[in-house]
Image: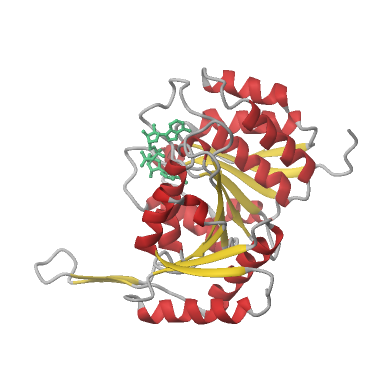
Amino acid sequence: MSRSQEYRIGVIPGDGIGHEVVPVALDAVRAAGIAIEEVPFDLGGERYLRTGEVLPDSVLEEIRGLDAVLLGAVGTPDVPPGVLERGLLLRLRFELDLYVNLRPFGSGPGRFNDGVDLVVVRENTEGSYAGEGGFLRHGTPHEIATQGSVNTRFGVERCVRYAFELAATRPRRHLALVHKTNVLTFSGDLWQRTFADVATDFPSVTTAYDHVDAACIHLVQAPDRYDVVVTDNLFGDILTDLAGAVAGGIGRAASGNLNPARTGPSLFEPVHGSAPDIAGTGRADPRAAVISAAMMLEFLGEADAGDRIRKAVVSSDDVTGTTAEVGRAIAERV
Ligand code: NAI
Ligand code: MG
């Protein structure tokens, strides 16, 4: 296979099983005949504990110049909550303007809940994750904590538009908005009006609305109700863990943090974390990382390679064994 381009891919294995699943994903990329230059970054809990650094500005600038980033997972038990989430994961999403978090769920043949095939488009730069809020009288009996949710017409519209464009390319051409408009009446109203406005540009896409609590029931009892779902940052975070469990397990849940405007690299990562409970035992399922790498190739325009990797994952669905054994089976089938 001749390739005109070599991609410069930032590789952040991170912590725990990130070190085990990322090499498997890179093997699958190479097996698909894609030339990549790996640019490794030592980031995550291990680096933070060693040096106190989370994401130095110089590293961020280096990442900005890459074609894409593949991340394993970050987090070690000794790092306080929030340090890596805010300082690394969310900072990368905000600074690189990765405004769509794309999370596909397909159970594949022979698996629990056969036939699940849906994609969640989660807004990735606003909502309750934007960091609005603070403490007053911290640590005193009169303490106050506020945590706001930031929703801009601009931010909601670009995410909703992406979801409509995606739905228009899929056979069912259906898009559901998930929110909680009956209680979150300000942000919900903005989302609902924006959704209705953008819908007029996509007459071929049928639409629906579900409250997020009802969506949880539907995802468990009738997941085939959904084709593409668009939702805000917090609802999307929670809903996609549920969707992952419904569609065959967290070891298969992949994601892309996309900058669809392509003003910089997009970042691809499994939905799962660093799994310290199984790290080092060879029991980590590498499929989520491999599918994330396939999404990366598809986003870079290498649709054939992405498709071959996906098919190899499906055809090695029954392979059991260590992370490396599953990885070898996938690479052979690619
Ligand atoms: P987790 O996803 O790491 O683990 C949850 C459970 O799923 C564990 O029992 C684990 O063994 C299992 N699991 C996860 N991935 C698996 C795989 N590929 N194959 C087989 N089993 C798998 O979530 P948890 O335990 O809440 O978090 C552990 C650490 O990871 C924490 O430090 C957390 O902050 C971090 N984390 C990082 C994320 C990221 O980097 N994007 C996302 C979620 C958590
Ligand atoms: Mg999550």
Task: Identify the image quadrant of the C terminus.
Answer: top right
Residue farthest to the left?
A: 141
Which residue: 58% across, 33% down? Answer: 109
Q: Is residue 247 left or right of residue 276?
A: right
In which image quadrant can residue 71 be found? top right
Give percent across and percent down for residue 312.
68, 30
Which residue: 52% across, 37% down? Answer: 252
Measured along the vertical axis of the image, is residue 154 above or below residue 170?
Answer: below
User: Can residue 87 be seen here?
Assistant: yes
Task: Identify the image quadrant of the N terminus.
Answer: top right
Seen from the viewer's position, the closer of residues 1 and 226 is 226
Seen from the viewer's position, the closer of residues 118 and 275 is 118
Give percent across and percent down for residue 50.
42, 37
In which image quadrant can residue 149 be found? bottom left
Which residue: 69% across, 25% down? Answer: 331
User: Can residue 123 be seen here?
Assistant: no
Q: Is residue 174 left or right of residue 243?
A: right
Quadrant for ligand 1 reads top left
Give percent across and percent down for residue 212.
39, 63
Q: Is residue 186 left or right of residue 120?
A: left
Measured along the vertical axis of the image, is residue 116 above or below residue 159?
Answer: above
Give percent across and percent down for residue 46.
43, 37
Q: Is residue 150 left or right of residue 224?
A: left
Which residue: 74% across, 35% down? Answer: 308
